[in-house]
Image (spheres, rainbow, N blue to C red):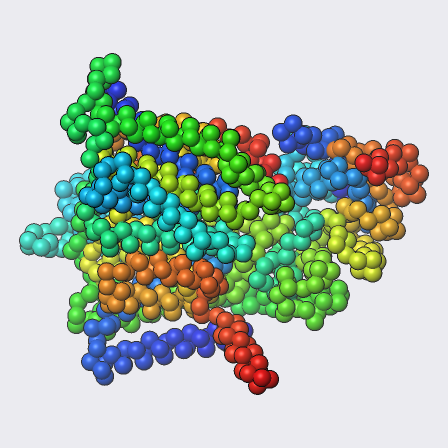
Amino acid sequence: MGHQRYLQILGLISAVIAVQLFTYYTDTGHHLTQLTMSAYYSLVIIGLCLLIGYAGQISLGHAGFFAIGGYISAFLTTHNFLPYKDNYFISFLSKSGLLASREDLYGGQILIFHPWAACIAAVLFAVIVAYLIGGPVLKLKGHYLAMATLGFGIIVYKIVLGTEKFGAADGISDVPSFVLLPGVEITGKLPVRIMNYYVAWVIVIICMIILLNLINSRIGRALRSIHGAEDASNAMGVNTAKYKLNTFVLSAAFASVAGVFLTHYNGGIGPSEASVMKSVRYVAIVAVGGMANLWGALIMGVLLNFLSLRGYFGTYDDAVFGGILILIMLFAPEGLLRIDLFRSLKGMFLKISDSKEKT
Amino acid sequence: MNIELFFQYIVAGITYGAIYSIVAIGFNIIYNTTGIINFAQGEFVMIGGMTAVTLHSFFPLPYAILLAVIITMIAGALIEIIFIRWLVNPSVLRMIIITIGISILLREAALYIWGEKVRGLPYFTGTSVSSLSIGGVHVSPQVLWVIGISAVIVVALNLFFSYTMPGRQMRACASNRDAARLCGVSASNMITLSFVLSAGIGALAGCVVSPITYVQYESGTGLAIKGFTVAILGGLGNSMAAVAAGLILGILESLSIWVMPTAYKDVISISILLLMLFVKPSGLFGSKEAASLKEF
Amino acid sequence: MAILEVRDLSRSFGGLQAVFNVSFTVKNGSIKALIGPNGAGKTTLFNLISGFLKPDTGSVLFNNQKIHGLKPYQVAGKGLSRTFQHIKLFHKMTVLENIMIGRHIHSKAEFISGMFNLPWTQREEKAIRERSLEILNFLGLSEMADAEATSLAYGQQRIAELARALACEPKLLLLDEPAAGLNMRETAEMAKLIARIRDMGITVLIVEHDMSLVMNISDEIIVLSYGQKIADDIPLAIQKNSEVIRVYLGEEDA
């Protein structure tokens, strides 16, 4: 059981390397930019897959958590805190080394948060928000749950859109690069494109291992039992409320981490990242991947985001995702990447050839 | 506080509230017959308004509106027949996702047909500057049209559900689908009818409100979430309570401008939705006992 | 010694008094049955005991500990396990996985240890699997271990649900109409199974319609009618109880 998991991960690692080498030899290195962005988006998607596919709880508001991560780290790493440097709290932060001084666009000195500090603050904030709203939201079921999470997403969208400090409709730009370790930084600068591709994929692979371990553990089983029959799960001693909440918070954390990293990679974030359409798109990808299928979610997440970011869907981008949602839910609610779908197709084929032989 | 301004806000609140109520009633009609929340409800309003604007270049206003309502009703029927009718026992999650997909497709189709431009019908009577003075409060005649037509819709629906055969059959389906089927009611036809009806009233609402608020390809989403808030406030499925809840939400939202920047107006109403869902999902007027009985 | 003690338990829904002032005890190591006409409040009583409903008044003591007001998972943690009248197996999970959920309260891996697949959680998983297979073996379901639980034949689904409850290693097992939908042969097998479970030292409280099953295996029987207890005695005495006969014959008249 465990070996299969690691073989799959090994396969993923080879695929990641193979794709990079392929782009190197075919001189299509510019594709790595979108592949890096897709990798970060797929962090949101695999987290959401755990929530929707395994625990059976829908969220139409995960773009909200992505935006919380992205916006807070963008704000903290671009907003000049120099005017507040006498403030007790800010000077304390400054002395603890959480703040850094850098040059702004016009050559002036500004005091900003160190990206690590901003990242931790952003993810922490997203986690706290998820805890606070998750409690009451996850008591709801079906339409109520869908609407409540949708409502949360819209609130985040309206707040970032309506707040001047967050750049209103323009969003926040000029976000500095994020030095993860000495020599390893998240940035969209061309010379380090290949390194950033690998940084993003290492993060995805680590997250994948964590989630694969989780779904194959006692907790993963308990989550699936909540999906299967919540009452019975509770009667078997599973603290369903707590597990649903923890999963919600975990998936929110994934989304906010993705938001932080992608914002540093892109050098900015805009309100469209918080829009309902983004949340719906994440759900669509989880659905195409087969709901309770982490690999399906990852593969579809990378594929569809890559195609979308490369502009293959043109002006029909949103329509494509709407169409995908409907088609999948109408004809293959269990998703596309299923072994038994191939099996049933094979069975159908055999039956047809059988009947042909008979006649 | 300026008392006249206060009343102006109240009137504005009632106008928006009336539209929210109609959207909420649209939700309720479909919810009652199918148990589905139709996430594309707001798009019916948008399509009704947009179609009427286009048709108005060819026809006089009343005919344009009538045709727009009929076209939207046909669209409603088609949506039900193509996407929903043939599904066997779909899960709630599946229905949510399908209706969301429908709403996206309708929105994108509208974007393709009409572009991003904001449109509106002309004022039914008078112009945008004409006003009637009612007890010292200046009211646009269109406001009276909105309130009047909303009231007519509510009364007509009540008559329809109480005195006509299809209306009664729909109610029978709502209270017990299996029993209704045993009595010879075709449940799937009733479901189509419910889509037709809510598409029709949504479209009509879209037409009357378009001179004031204008419509655009993406107006549907905002209206849908407001309509849903109202449906929840009134108690899901309870259309008369939705009227009261709609007016309450409209007025609250309108008055919120006094304490919050306009940009956060929607935040207020959605916070009300969340609060309601957390505290009393059975609605302001719904009884907790009835809800708990339903559960067990 | 009483393992379960129910005192003056009442619960109403709106105007309907589903359970009214019901008191009884269940002796350790016995099989006690709960019978009564439809709508007598049997399932409500079960839900009150297992934490799915909160009582309006009254108390439920399990091993002399208050358990009313606890959540179902907390009640399960105390050693009280149940099955459902309408089978509630976990969809899209195999029979073995269903049983493994029964081991939940006897294992510890949480989110963090699960995410990092720590050595001790691997050992724990192995133990859960082995114990679950043993239980399947005991109930003769081991061939079905890898089948999807909800795809089993109806009778087997009942057994699988029982297996899941047993995997909790409960001190008290609540069975809600375990023979509902079973044919006579299956019902007889179920009766034997329940008796074997009692012989393993597990106390059983059972709601059942099938009189033959109840009369054969129960040590004591409580009769409910319109939410009230009208009799609580050994099977022989229940059969002769005029009040019980009136309630049951009355039902047949209607």
Residue at 24% in and 44% down: B55
Tally the marks: 0
Residue at 6% in and 54% down: A107
Q: Is residue A62 left or right of residue C138?
A: left
Rendered position, B229 above or below C157: above
Q: Work out whether residue A6 can be spotted.
A: yes
> Which residue is at the front of the view, B143 or A81?
B143
Residue at 82% in and 49% down: C210
Q: Position of residue A282 (x, y in %)?
A: 36, 58
State the quadrant of the N terminus of chain B: top left
Q: Is residue A75 left or right of residue C187?
A: left
Residue most toward the top? B135
Give the image quarter of residue A105.
Answer: bottom left
Rendered position, A349 above or below B150: below
Residue most toward the bottom? A357
Give the image quarter of residue A319.
Answer: bottom left
Rendered position, A23 above or below B90: below
> Which residue is at the front of the view, C164 or A31?
A31
> Which residue is at the front of the view, B50 or A348?
B50
Q: Work out whether residue A165 can be spotted.
A: no
Residue at 55% in and 50% down: A240
Q: Position of residue B83 (x, y in %)?
A: 44, 55
Q: Position of residue C251 (x, y in %)?
A: 82, 37
> Which residue is at the front of the view, C50 or B15?
B15
State the quadrant of the C terminus of chain B: top right
